[in-house]
Amino acid sequence: MWTETMIKSFLALSECKNITQAAEKLFFSQQALSKQISRLEGELGCQLVIRGRNGIKLTEEGEVYRDTFYQVMEEISQAASQISEMHKQNENRIRIAQLEMATLPDSLRPFYQKFSLLYPETEMDFVVYDDPELLEKLEDDSVDIAISFDKGFASPKWRSYEVLPLYSVDIAVCVNKNYPGASEWKSYKDIPDIPFIMNQNKKEEEIARVRGVGFSPERIIWEDNLRSTLMDLELLKGATLISSDTLISSNKELLLFSIRDGKYGQSTVCAIWKKTNPKVGMKKFTESLGKYVRNYVKKRKTEETA
C-alpha cells in the first residue's frame, strides 16, 4: 500500500528533477528518498522515473501518476481543513442528555437561557434516552453531560466523573383515576397492595423502590420501556412510581400520590460528566452551571429562613 511519504517523495523528485535537491527539500537522505521512490514503483507495478546524466525524467506512467497525485494531495489537504473546522465547531457543541419524558425544570430554565446569551458560540444540543441507556451514552462519549437521578455516583465506578447535584424531586405513586377504588384514596398510604408496573432493565433497583414505599414486589408487572408502562396504566393493570418532573405527571387521566417521606420519597437529580472531557465549551458550561446551582441553593435557603 502506498503511503503519503511515498507520494511526497515522488512529487518532490518530479518538481526538482534532481535527487539531491529533492532529498534536501524533504530533509531526507538521498538513500531514503530513493527507497521511497522504489517502494512506490513496486506498489504501482510500473517505473515512474528514469535516472540519466541530465537528471531525472518521468516516464509516461510517471507523468500520469504525477498529475493524479497532485490532485490526491489537494483533496487530502481540503479534507484535513474541513475536518479541522468540524473539530473546532465540535469543541463548542455540548450534547446534554436527559431522561425520556423528563421536563425542563423551572430551576434550570433561567440558566440555559442566560448561558445562551453570554456564550452564543457554545451550542447546546438536547437529546433524550431511556434509563439506563442515558448513562451508557455518557460512558461511550455519545453525549457530554447526562442529567440523571443519583445512581450511587459516590461509588468507585464513577470516580472519573464529576457529579453536580442539581435539585430534588418528589416521588409519587401514579395510577389511572379509573382504577377501582382510586377515587377514595387520600394518600399513598391508603393504596392497597396492588400490582406495580416497573422497568425490567433495572430489576434490583425497582424491587427496592417498591418495597421501600411499603408495597409488595411479588406483584410487579415488568415492562421494558415507559410507553409500555403508560399503556398498562391506561388498561388499569396497576400503579407505578414516577418523579414529579416527568411530562406524564400533568396527565389529567392519572392520579399522583406524593410519598416525600423516607429514603424513596425523594430523588436527587444530578448533572454528570467525564473529568477528562476536553471540549472548550464544556469548561465554560460546567463552571457556569456550578456557580448557578450554588447561588440558587443559597437563595432558596435565605428565602426559607426569612
Image (cartoon, grey):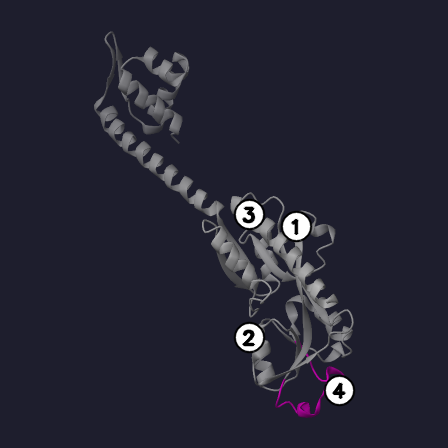
Direction from residue 102 to residue 60 in the image, left or right: left
Which of the labelled discs sits on residue 227, or is there none? 2
Which of the labelled discs sits on residue 190, or is there none? 4
Which circle, 3 or 1, is nearer the viewer? Answer: 3
Q: Classify mark 3: residues with Cα within 10 Å, few (<14), some (14-19) or many (20+).
A: some
Foreground pick, 70 / 254: 254
Question: Quadrant of the image for the N terminus?
Answer: top left
Marker count (numbered):
4
Above/below status of 291 relative to 48: below
Q: Earlier in the sequence, mark 3 or mark 4?
A: 4
Is residue 243 within the magenta segment?
A: no
Instruction: Provide residue 205's location: percent of width, then percent of height.
Output: 71, 67
Provide the major secondary structure of the magenta segment: loop
Which circle, 1 or 2, is nearer the viewer? Answer: 1
Instruction: Provide residue 51's location: percent of width, then percent of height.
Output: 27, 13
Q: Earlier in the sequence, mark 2 or mark 4?
A: 4
Q: Is residue 42 visible?
A: no
Which circle, 2 or 3, is nearer the viewer? Answer: 3
Instruction: Provide residue 111's location: percent of width, then percent of height.
Output: 56, 59
Residue linked to disc 3: 284
Could you tell me the amino acid type at mark 3?
Answer: Lys
Quick one: SS at disc 2?
helix
How far is disc 2 from disc 4 in space, using C-alphas?
27 Å
In magenta, the rendered stretch is: 176-197
Q: Earlier in the sequence, mark 1 or mark 4?
A: 1
Instruction: Provide residue 303's location: percent of width, then percent of height.
Output: 69, 66
How far is disc 2 from disc 3 in space, using C-alphas?
36 Å
Quick one: SS at disc 3?
helix
Could you tell me the amino acid type at mark 4?
Answer: Asp
Above/below status of 258 relative to 54: below
Could you tell me the amino acid type at mark 2?
Answer: Arg
